[in-house]
């Protein structure tokens, strides 16, 4: 038994060392670098493509941490290591700037607006924000601490509609999932969520009631790969990056 | 020895972090704030309801488990312990696909009776039961297996029928195992997060249990989050100290 344990320990040690000394360098060209991007969960469809482009052109391998912007802000404030932060609102970017965690200035790289997500074919006949207050309708929103939830509150206030949500999801993709699974009849999400989801239909919210979300991006002060971070941001702002974002339902800058 | 110390330190430091960083001067205010009180009340209700359901369903399940052998037992045991190793979020998704409005069972409930389980307190109770019941089943099954069969045989020899034997002999002998299983089950239910947020969602007073409230508050009201965490910590600690070494093992 003891001998077996020793063999196991030795094996783990060898494997562990191999992992450390080998790692990224052994399996790839020396110029390849890694990049950690903290991005709002609504950005996933677009940023996955931007990441693939970055890897192909600049030999930078990005790893994405997608979550609600408020979650990412919390993680970064607690010292989570990252190179780039892409937020779904300017408020959380400002929070990090005030905390001295952002290097340089933040750049707005995309806009998004809200849409009502409904089941395919809109079986409940939802056409306006006011319809969301109908009795018996299961409506799901994002929590007001989430940018999408804050925007939804603003839109509902503009439309002077009171909604009794069944749940306040902790990220906007949670809202989308609940509608896509048919558990909720409707939810307020970003236009980009509906464009890329394919599992829900969107009901347009008129400009007079809609809210425009600004997405800022910045290099983090603790960045291990500042050059790669800048390359990522440059790509996002380039015409290539903007084309990807527009295809994913965002509005360019 | 040094490694053991390191291991202990690894458990101790997060607790120390919570205690050191806790806003003690605001503790009373945070506990009595309506958001916190609502979450605590809901958590207490849901976890106790989950434990009650686990007792009603789990004890018979443990009985059957302890009396079957071979492959069937292995299969049933794997099924009952699955929620212990399954990531709770996956459990939540599975619950949605089974009991959701378009789920396996849920679609029938919805079409026939107009009942929708997700987003209700019932969903939070179900999520907690799903994750916590295995703890009770395992503890009771352990108790049953360590039971001396001669007591039951003696009762039967004296003319007692099946139900009588169970109620008068087996159940009293099992009391310690049931108790420790129920307490563990309750503690696990109280701490449930992943399955709850996925299956039941998040709404104050309806499905926002303490762990969910901690997660929501962490960004907006970090002080409340720390205080709520400390409450959960104190409860868990009290349970473990109270149970001493009775937990999970059969009573000695």
Image (spheres, coloured by chain):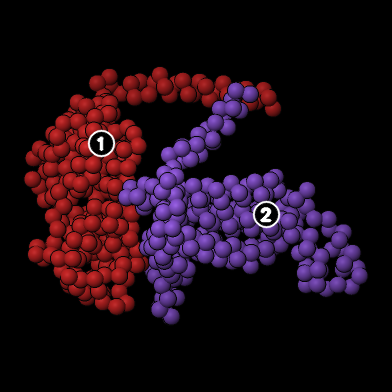
Picture coordinates of residue A12, whole percent (x, y): 53, 25
Name the quadrant of the C terminus of chain A: top left
Mark 1 Cα-neighbour bin, 10 Å: few <14, some 14–19, many ≥20: few
> Residue lying furthest bottom in this view?
B112
The foreground one among A70 and B194 is: A70
Chain identifier for the red-coloured part of the image: A
What is the secondary structure assignment of the residue under circle 2?
Answer: helix
Q: Which residue is mark 2?
A: B180
Q: Residue at x 52, y 22 (%)?
A: A13
What is the secondary structure assignment of the residue under circle 1?
Answer: loop
Name the quadrant of the N terminus of chain A: top right
Q: In this image, A23 relative to B186: left or right?
A: left
The foreground one among A25 and B192 is: B192
Is residue B86 among the parts visible in the rendering?
no
Mark 2 Cα-neighbour bin, 10 Å: few <14, some 14–19, many ≥20: many
Residue B103 placement: quadrant: bottom left
Q: Which dot marks residue B146?
A: none
Residue B64 placement: quadrant: bottom right
Residue A115 placement: quadrant: bottom left
Circle 1 marks a residue in which chain?
A: A
Q: Residue at x 10, y 37 (%)?
A: A238
Q: Which residue is mark 1?
A: A99
**Above or below for A155 versus B159:** above
Q: Residue at x 55, y 53 (%)?
A: B188
Q: In this image, A72 relative to A154: left or right?
A: right
Q: Colour in which chain B is shown?
A: purple
Picture coordinates of residue A94, whole percent (x, y): 20, 42
């Amino acid at each position: 038994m003891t001998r077996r344990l020793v063999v196991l320990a030795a094996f783990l040690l060898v494997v562990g060392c191999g992992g450390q000394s080998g790692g990224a360098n052994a399996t790839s060209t020396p110029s390849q670098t890694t990049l950690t991007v903290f991005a709002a969960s609504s950005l996933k469809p677009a940023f996955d493509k931007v990441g693939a482009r970055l890897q192909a052109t600049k030999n930078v391998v990005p790893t994405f941490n997608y979550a609600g912007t408020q979650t990412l802000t919390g993680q970064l404030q607690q010292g989570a290591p990252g190179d780039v932060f892409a937020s779904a609102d300017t408020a959380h970017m400002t929070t990090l700037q005030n905390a001295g965690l952002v290097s340089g200035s933040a750049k707005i790289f995309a806009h998004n607006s809200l849409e009502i997500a409904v089941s395919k074919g809109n079986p409940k006949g939802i056409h306006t924000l006011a319809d969301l207050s109908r009795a018996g309708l299961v409506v799901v929103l994002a929590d007001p601490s989430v940018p999408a939830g804050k925007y939804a509150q603003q839109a509902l206030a503009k439309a002077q509609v009171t909604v009794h949500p069944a749940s306040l999801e902790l990220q906007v993709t949670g809202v989308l999932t609940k509608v896509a699974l048919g558990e909720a009849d409707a939810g307020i999400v970003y236009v980009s969520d509906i464009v890329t989801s394919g599992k829900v239909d969107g009901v347009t919210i008129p400009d007079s009631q809609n809210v425009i979300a600004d997405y800022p991006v910045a290099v983090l002060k603790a960045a291990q790969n500042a050059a790669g971070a800048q390359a990522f941001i440059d790509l996002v702002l380039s015409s290539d990056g903007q084309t990807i974002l527009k295809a994913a339902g965002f509005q360019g800058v | 020895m040094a490694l053991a110390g390191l291991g202990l330190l690894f458990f101790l430091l997060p607790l120390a972090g919570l205690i050191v960083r806790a806003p003690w001067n605001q503790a009373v205010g945070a506990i009595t704030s309506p958001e916190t009180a609502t979450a605590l009340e809901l958590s207490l209700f849901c976890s106790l309801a989950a434990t009650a359901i686990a007792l009603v369903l789990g004890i018979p399940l443990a009985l059957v488990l302890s009396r079957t052998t071979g492959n069937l037992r292995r299969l049933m045991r794997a099924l009952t312990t699955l929620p212990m190793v399954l990531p709770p979020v996956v459990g939540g998704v599975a619950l949605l696909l089974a009991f959701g409005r378009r789920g396996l069972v849920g679609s029938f409930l919805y079409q026939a009776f107009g009942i929708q389980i997700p987003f209700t307190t019932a969903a939070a109770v179900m999520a907690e039961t799903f994750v916590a019941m295995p703890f009770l089943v395992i503890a009771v099954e352990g108790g049953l297996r360590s039971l001396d069969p001669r007591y039951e045989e003696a009762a039967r020899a004296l003319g007692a029928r099946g139900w009588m034997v169970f109620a008068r002999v087996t159940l009293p002998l099992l009391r310690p195992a049931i108790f420790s299983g129920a307490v563990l089950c309750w503690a696990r239910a109280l701490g449930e997060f992943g399955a709850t947020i996925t299956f039941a969602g998040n709404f104050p007073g309806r499905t926002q249990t303490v762990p969910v409230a901690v997660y929501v508050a962490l960004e907006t009201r970090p002080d409340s989050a720390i205080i709520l965490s400390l409450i959960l910590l104190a409860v868990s600690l009290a349970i473990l100290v109270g149970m001493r070494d009775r937990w999970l093992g059969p009573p000695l």
